[in-house]
Amino acid sequence: MNAYTKLTQLMEANPELVFNNDGYENLAKSVVDAHKDAITDIETVLQENVKGFVRFQNFKPRSDGSVAVRLQAHYNDEGSFTGVMYIPLTLFKEPTP
């Protein structure tokens, strides 16, 4: 099973992880706590497929109906700068975004 299929299945099974954040908003702690196992599974997929991956934040719906994966990642090899990335879910159909 490829990363796209795994992430899509996890997203569909855990709809509370789809969050239309505004700026720096995050998932509620109660949502994170209720979905710890799913988040661990998502982070395993992301760790295997995103260079510099740090942590999953949420699935972000887009105005065109698509979904992006919002995550934190190191932007350099030293890990001295960590920031947000929005990776379109469809990019996980291909090797390593």
Image (spheres, rainbow, N blue to C red):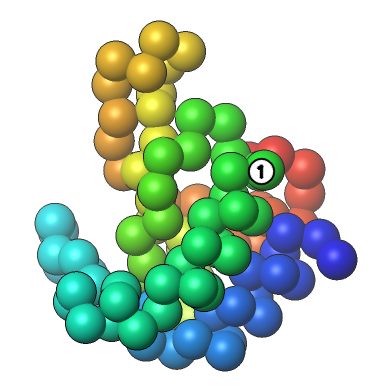
Can residue 19 be spotted in the picture? no
Q: Residue at x 52, y 74 (%)?
A: 38
Residue 68 at x, y percent in the picture: 47, 63
| Residue at the far right in the pictured view | 1
Q: Secondary structure at mark 1?
A: helix
Q: Nearer the viewer, residue 91 or 84?
A: 84
The residue labelled by disc 1 is: 49
Q: Amino acid at mark 1?
A: Asn
Locate the N terminus by quadrant.
bottom right
Q: Quadrant of residue 56?
A: bottom left
Residue 94 at x, y percent in the picture: 77, 49
Q: Nearer the viewer, residue 27 or 60?
A: 27
**Above-or-below relation of 59 to 91:** below
On the rendered structure, is 30 left or right of 12?
Answer: left
Residue 43 at x, y percent in the picture: 53, 55
Q: Residue at x 54, y 79 (%)?
A: 11
**Above-or-below relation of 81 to 28:** above
**Above-or-below relation of 79 to 46:** above
Q: Quadrant of residue 75?
A: top left
**Above-or-below relation of 9 to 2:** below
On the rendered structure, is 17 left or right of 91?
Answer: left
Locate the C terminus by quadrant.
top right
Q: Nearer the viewer, residue 13 or 18?
A: 13
